[in-house]
C-alpha cells in the first residue's frame, strides 16, 4: 500500500508541486508540499519537500518496505495526495497568465 502511495506522489510531482497530508497516529494530519522526487537505483524515492515546521526545503528517503515516512522534524506518518484538483486549477491559471499576460 505504501509503495502505491509513493508511486502516486512521484507521478504527481512530475507535473509540479504535490500537496500531501501525512496521516499520523494521534493527530488529524500534517501537511507538506512535495517539490520533487527522484527514483533511487535500489528502489524507492528521494523526496524533496517543504514543511511549515522547518525552514527551507528538506529531503527524506523512502525505500520499498517502509510502512511510513519520517520527516526532518522527526514526525512520522503515511502520505496521501490531497487537493490535486485545486493544484490543477492553479496550474491552468499560471499557464493562462503566462500565455495571455492577464490574470
Image (cartoon, rainbow, N blue to C red):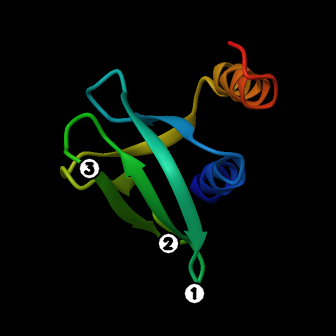
Residue extending farthest top: 103
Residue under numbered circle 3: 56
Q: Is residue 5 left or right of residue 52?
A: right
In the figure, residue 44 lies in which quadrant? Answer: bottom right
Q: Is residue 72 above or below residue 65?
A: above
Report how far apart the C-alphas of labels 2 and 3 lie in the structure: 23 Å
Dot 1 or dot 2, earlier in sequence: 1
Answer whether residue 9 is visible to the viewer in this image.
Answer: yes
Answer whether residue 67 is visible to the viewer in this image.
Answer: no
Q: How many marks?
A: 3
Which is more toward the observer, 99 or 44?
Answer: 99
Dot 3 or dot 1, earlier in sequence: 1
Image quarter hosting the C terminus: top right
Residue extending farthest bottom: 41
Q: Is residue 32 left or right of residue 80?
A: left
Q: Is residue 98 above or below residue 67?
A: above
Tag of residue 63 = 2
Contact check, label 1 and label 2, Cβ < 8 Å: yes
Nearer the observer, disc 3 or disc 1?
Answer: 3
Q: Position of residue 53 (x, y in %)?
A: 20, 37
Q: Residue sitting at 81 percent across and 23 percent down?
A: 100
| Secondary structure found at label 1 | loop
Residue under numbered circle 1: 42
Q: Residue sitting at 71 percent across and 47 percent down?
A: 15
Nearer the observer, disc 2 or disc 3?
Answer: 3
Report how far apart the C-alphas of labels 1 and 2 lie in the structure: 8 Å
Which is more toward the observer, 22 or 39?
Answer: 39
Which is more toward the observer, 78 or 53?
Answer: 53
Amino acid at each position: 500500500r505504501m509503495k502505491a502511495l509513493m508511486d502516486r506522489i512521484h507521478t504527481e510531482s512530475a507535473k509540479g508541486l504535490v500537496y500531501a497530508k501525512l496521516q499520523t497516529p494521534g493527530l488529524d494530519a500534517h501537511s507538506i508540499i512535495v517539490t520533487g522526487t527522484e527514483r533511487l537505483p535500489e528502489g524507492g524515492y528521494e523526496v524533496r519537500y517543504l514543511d511549515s515546521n522547518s525552514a527551507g526545503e528538506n529531503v527524506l528517503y523512502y525505500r520499498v518496505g517502509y510502512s511510513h515516512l519520517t520527516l526532518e522534524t522527526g514526525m512520522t506518518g503515511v502520505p496521501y495526495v490531497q487537493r490535486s484538483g485545486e493544484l490543477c486549477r492553479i496550474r491552468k491559471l499560471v499557464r493562462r497568465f503566462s500565455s495571455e499576460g492577464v490574470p
